[in-house]
Image: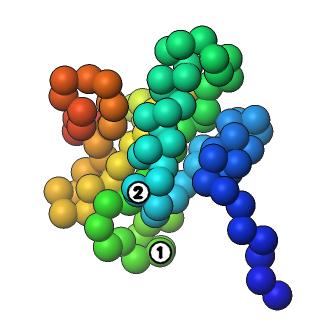
Amino acid sequence: MSRPAYRDSSVLAYTAAHDLVLITRNVRDFIRLNEQWVALRDWGVLARPHAGILISLGVVPEREWADLVMDLVLHPQCPPLQDQLLLWHAVANRWETDNPYSHQRRRAITL
């Protein structure tokens, strides 16, 4: 049985409405959606923040990806995830924050 396909924007809206952190490997689409979400929030069109988006950059085995996510969200110094997009940069072996409208778009996160 196949699962129904949902638009990425619907997935982000659903996770925001239910205060769920979105965990994905879909880099291109969710970076773009986060950019749009941030702009709409800045303009006052969207009142509700999303609970966070976590994306892996590079090849990360499923089990390792799950462990990385859990290590992040359970870490005592986990940064606030609300309206944030964090990327696991596999080559650099670190989490980075994506700031779409900043002069320094990506910044490493120190835990």
**Count of numbered marks:** 2
User: Is disc 1 surrounded by few (<14), some (14 to 19) or many (20+) residues within 10 Å?
Assistant: few
Disc 1, SS: helix
User: Is disc 2 surrounded by few (<14), some (14 to 19) or many (20+) residues within 10 Å?
Assistant: some
Say whether residue 69 is left or right of residue 1.
Answer: left
Say whether residue 70 is left or right of residue 103.
Answer: right
Disc 2, SS: helix
- Front disc: 2 or 1: 2
**Label 1, on which residue?**
62
- State if disc 1 and disc 2 touch (CB < 8 Å): no
Could you say which is closer to the camera, residue 89 or residue 37? Answer: 37
Would you place residue 99 above or below residue 24 in this image?
A: above
Q: Looking at numbered disc 1 in the image, what kind of residue is underneath it?
A: Glu
Q: Residue at x 36, y 71 (%)?
A: 60
Could you say which is closer to the camera, residue 84 or residue 13? Answer: 13
Q: The C terminus is located in which quarter?
A: top left
Q: Mark on residue 104?
A: none
Say whether residue 6 is left or right of residue 63.
Answer: right
**Where does the image place residue 80, in percent across and percent down from the top left?**
48, 28
Q: CA distance from mark 2 to mark 1?
A: 16 Å
**Where does the image place residue 51, in percent across and percent down from the top left?**
60, 35
Q: Quadrant of residue 107?
A: top left
Q: Residue at x 65, y 21 (%)?
A: 46
The way the protein has been coloured in the rendering is: rainbow
**Where does the image place residue 16, in percent across and percent down from the top left?**
68, 36
Residue pushed farthest bottom?
Answer: 1
Q: Looking at numbered disc 2 in the image, what kind of residue is underneath it?
A: Val
Q: Mark on residue 27?
A: 2
Would you place residue 101 above or below residue 16 in this image?
A: above
